[in-house]
Image (cartoon, coloured by chain):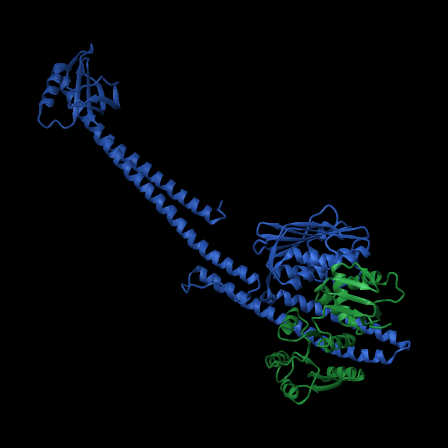
Amino acid sequence: MNILLLEDDRTAADHIRNGLGALGHDVLWFSDGADAYAGLDDTHCDLAIVDRMVPGLDGLSLVGRMRAEGRTTPVLMLTALGGVEDRVAGLDGGADDYLAKPFAFVELVARVNALIRRPTASADATVLRANDIELNLIRREATRGNRTIDLQQREFRLLEQLLRNVDRVVTKTMLLETVWNFDFDPRTNVVETQVSRLRTKLNEGFAHNAIQTVRGSGYMVRSSI
Amino acid sequence: MMPRTLRGLIAVTGLAIGVLTIALGGATYYFANKSLVDELNTRIAVESRSLIAIGAVSGIDGVATAVRAREAAPSVGNLGYIVIDRRGRHLAGALRAPVPPPGYWDCMAYLRADGRQSLAQSLNSPLPGGGRLVVAADRTIVNEADGTVIILFGTAFGLILLFGFGGAWLVGRIVRGRLDRMATTADAIMAGDLARRMPLTGEHGEFDQLSTVINRMLDRIEVLLENLRRISTGVAHDIRSPLSRARGRLEVLEASLAGLPQRDAVGSSIRDIDDVLDLLRALLGISEIEGFAVRKRFVRLDLGALVEDVADGYRPVVEAAGMMIATEIEAAAVLGDPALLRRALANLIDNAILYTPPGTHIIARVALRGDIVALIVRDDGPGVPAHERENIFSRFVRLDSSRSTPGHGLGLNLVAAVASAHRGRARALPTERGLAVELQLPAAGALMRTASTSVAGSAAGSV
C-alpha cells in the first residue's frame, strides 16, 4: 500500500516510516503541508497519515482541501494535542480516524489496517462473515455454525466491529471508541470483561476460539482456522 | 446596629426621618398652642383684675354694671362674662354657660350668640365681698391654629415620609442595580469568561472607583492565570515530546529483543513512561475542561439515555467484580458534551468498582428537581469519612485507604471540572453508608420520554 505521511518531527516520522515499511507499506514522507498537498497529485496513495500541526499547510486544512476536491483517500490524523476538543475538530474536519501522540505502534498499525480495508469491506454490507460466524445486521442475528447465539446489544456491536476487521487486530482503544463511545481509557477492564463474555457465548460447544487475543495489541477474529 | 441590607437601610432612614418630623410637629404644636393659650389667659386675667378693682370700689353691683356696659359696647372683642352673687344668683353677663370651676379652665363649653356650641377658656375669680366673676375668651382661634398646625405637619410628615422612603428606595434601587450588574459580571467571570470586566459609567463616582479597582485586580488575575496555563501546558508539552520519542525508541528496542530476557525490562519502562504520559494527558485534559472552551460543543442531550448506556457498558465488569449496578432514571435533558459526561460518569463508576468490596450495589440515578438535573452515583461500600468529603474533588487527593490502588488522584477532580464546565457543581452527599457523588447540572427543558427504572441486566435488551 502507498501511504502518504505528513509529519514534521523527524524522529516520529522515522519511527512510523520504519515500522510501516517493515510491514510492507511504501511510505511517502513530507514534512511540509503544502508539499504534501502537491504530492497528492503526483502519486496514488491509499491512505494519508497527517499530523495536525505542521509547517506550510496544517493537517486540518489539508484534509479540508482534500475533501473539498472530492478526494476520498482515508485520512488518519495524528496530533500532539491530545485534547477532547482536537479529536472532534479532526473528525469533523474530514479525517476518518484520529490518534493522539504518543501512541503505541500497534495502535497505529491497527488503525492504518482498519482504514485501508474500509473501502473493500463495504460499509453497507448487511451480513458479516468470518469462518463459521455470521452476523446479520438487518435481522440483528448472530449465528455460529448453525446455532443462533443470543447476544445483548453491546455484545452485538462488539462482534460487528471485530467482524468488520476480520484478520486485523482491533485495539482496545478502537473498541472503546466504537462500541462504548468512550474517548478515554477507563480504569477498570471494561473491554476485557465484555470480550470475555462474548467469547464465552461464541465458543460454547465449539473447539476453536472465535476471538483471539493478540497480546499487547488487541483482539482479532480470523476468517479461517 | 447598622442594618445589613439596603432594604434595612432604607427602612431605618425612612423611619428616622418620620420620627424627626413627628417630634418637630409635636414641638411646634405644643409651643404654638401654649403661646396662644397664654395670650388669651393674659387677656382674661387683665380684664378680671380691672373688674375686681371696680368691685373693690363699687361692690358687686358696680361690677355687674361694668359688665353690662362692656357687653353693650360695639367692639366687645371676644370676651364673655358671668357675674353671680354669693348665693349663686346670676347678676350680669351674657355668656351662656354653666359656671366653670374656680381658677383657669381651658375647655368651658358655651353657646355662641348664633346658637352654636363652642369652647372657651375662662378665669373664675372671687369678687371682694362675695360673689364670683367669670371672664372667658373664645378658643376658636386657638383651635383653628392647632388645626392648622396639625394639618401643616400632617401634610409635611406625609410628604417627608413619601420623599424619604421614595428617595431611599430610589437610591437603593440605583445602588442595587449597580451591584446587580457587578454581580452578573462576577458570575460571568466565575463561569469562565475571564475577559469580562466590571461595567464603568464614566461618571467617576464611587462605583466606578470600585469597579476600576476590581478590574485592575481581574487584569492581574487574568495575567497570572494565563502565565500559569502557559507554563503548565509548556512544561507538559516539553515533557511529553522527549518522553514520546523515548517511548518510540523503546518500542523499537522491545520488538528487536523478542525472546530475550531484557525485553521485560524495556516493556516495564514503556509502561512507566505511559503512566507519566497518562498523568500529563489527564492534567492537560482537566485544564482544557476548566478553560470552558468545551462549551462551544455543547448539545442538548438526553442524560438518562447516556447514563443507561454507560451503566450498561459497565455491567459486565461490575458483575465480574461481584457487584451490582442499577439505574434509576427520570427523563431529563441537559446542555452538554456527551463525551465529557460519559467520562465523568465512567470515573465515578470506576471509583465505585475499585474502592469497594465485592457485594457492593452501585446505583446511577438521574433525577429532575425543578430546573436542576441531578446525576448521582451511589454505592453502599465503605464510603468516605465525613471530614474528607469536601476534599475528594481536589487534585491529587488520594485517601489513605486507596493508596494501594493505582491512579493519580485526578478522577474526581475531572468530575468536578466537568460539572463546572456544564455550569453545575459536584459534591459528595452525606450518607449513612457508602459514597454518593452528585452532579447538579442545569436542566435544558423537558424531555418527552417516560420515566423508567431498570435493575441489573434488564436494561440491556437482547437482540
Q: Nearer the viewer, residue B22 or B377?
A: B377
Q: Colour of chain A?
A: green
User: Residue at (22%, 19%) from the top-left corner?
Assistant: B125
User: In the visual, does B261 lie left or right of A2?
Assistant: right
Residue B140 in percent (x, y) is at: 21, 29
Which chain is tinted blue? B
- The answer to whether residue A168 is above or below residue B115 is below
User: Quadrant where the C terminus of chain B lies?
Assistant: bottom right
User: In the visual, does B50 lie left or right of A210?
Assistant: left
Residue lying furthest bottom in this view?
A: A42
Q: Quadrant of residue A110?
A: bottom right
- The answer to whether residue B60 is above or below residue A118 is above
User: Residue at (63%, 59%) from the top-left corner?
Assistant: B419
Q: Quadrant of residue B285?
A: bottom right
User: In the visual, does B227 lie left or right of A190?
Assistant: left
User: Residue at (90%, 65%) from the top-left corner?
Assistant: A207
Instruction: Determine if residue B336 is in view.
Output: yes
User: Residue at (84%, 78%) from the top-left corner?
Assistant: B254
Q: Nearer the viewer, residue A193 or A135?
A: A135
Instruction: Determine if residue A186 is in view.
Output: no
- The answer to whether residue B381 is above or below residue B291 is above
Residue lying furthest front in this view?
A: A146
Residue B89 in percent (x, y) is at: 18, 11
